[in-house]
Amino acid sequence: MMQTERVLQQVLEWGRSLTGFADEHAVEAARGGQYILRHIHPSLSDTSARTGRDPQDETLIVAFYRELALLFWLDDCNDLGLIAPEQLAAVEQALGQGEPCLLPGFEGCAVLRASLAALAYDRRDYAQLLDDTQRYCAALRAAHAHAAGAERWSYAEYLHNGIDSIAYANVFCCLSLLWGLDMATLRTSPAFCQVLRLISAIGRLQNDLHGRDKDRSASETDNAAILLLQRYPAMPVVEFLNDELAGHTRMLHQVMAEERFPAPWGPLIDAMAAIRTQYYQTSAIRYRSDSAGAGNRTPA
């Protein structure tokens, strides 16, 4: 069995301990994780002499893919109500504090957090991952509450919340934790914090543009295009968001040109900025509403 197949099988097996976990969550995690690791593999090979962390270490790859699958699952728990609100609250507390979830059906939460704690090259990354998870869950809840409420967000408020709900901070922190990328030190740099915010905004806008048709058909309101159309029906929304995306991208490139971050951060940021034309095109089930994307959310 090839490593990719073995890794996916291990993510699926782990996911079976989570109520509401679906094959899609593991498949998308493996696809996205492979996309990221493929783009930064040369840089990870360069850093391995310092860290001793092999880019092809299957244990590390499985842990990374499981974290990505967890993020997809948490997103759907909020959007689709896969689990009861009281269950979700307990899960969020466990994942954000690194404590066992006492509810049956969620054993995988403790397993993943314990494995990441044990694998952490720098314990500061593990502590930061818990904080990032808390912000991610809070942003998902805020978006869900806003959709059900009467008060409408402005575009600025939506994007501010969406920067956390896109979960890029979790992805980067998990990579740093597993492969020793020194993100804890980099977070003290204002330029790096600006890059993190810009790439997260880019990710949010790319996600919304690519998924707008599916979100509209599902009556989802957690999408910038849908929010703007509701407020300004005559607005050329797609053109506006593409212009916003181009502006954020130019600012990102300017900061990256002025600051030389250590490997693999340059290739990693570039890969995430290009995700719209690569990863999203192969993720039909999650992001498209046509027949090609009408996949089943079958529990694993």
Image: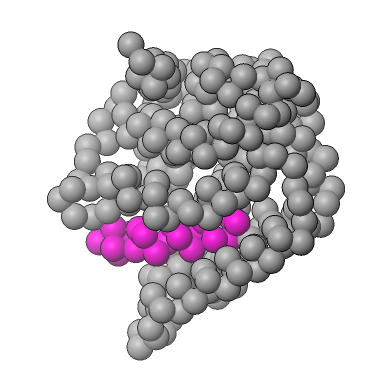
Q: Please give the name of the residue rendered at 22% of the width and 37% of the height, measured from the top-left corner.
A: 296
Q: Magenta part of the protein: which range?
A: 199-222
The answer to which quarter of the image holds residue 226 is bottom left
Q: Please give the name of the residue rendered at 40% of the width and 46% of the height, measured from the top-left corner.
A: 279
Q: Position of residue 270 (x, y in %)?
A: 57, 51
Main SS of the magenta part reads helix
Q: Please give the name of the residue rendered at 48% of the width and 54% of the height, measured from the top-left corner.
A: 274
The residue closer to the viewer here, 220 or 212, is 212
Q: Please give the name of the residue rendered at 33% of the width and 11% of the height, measured from the top-left corner.
A: 1
205 inside magenta stretch: yes
| Placement of the C terminus among the 4 image quadrants | top left
Task: Residue lying at the far bottom in this picture: please name it.
Answer: 234
The residue closer to the viewer here, 300 or 180, is 180
Q: Compared to 181, does 14 lie above or below?
A: above
Q: Is residue 184 left or right of residue 176?
A: right
Q: Position of residue 176 (x, y in %)?
A: 68, 33
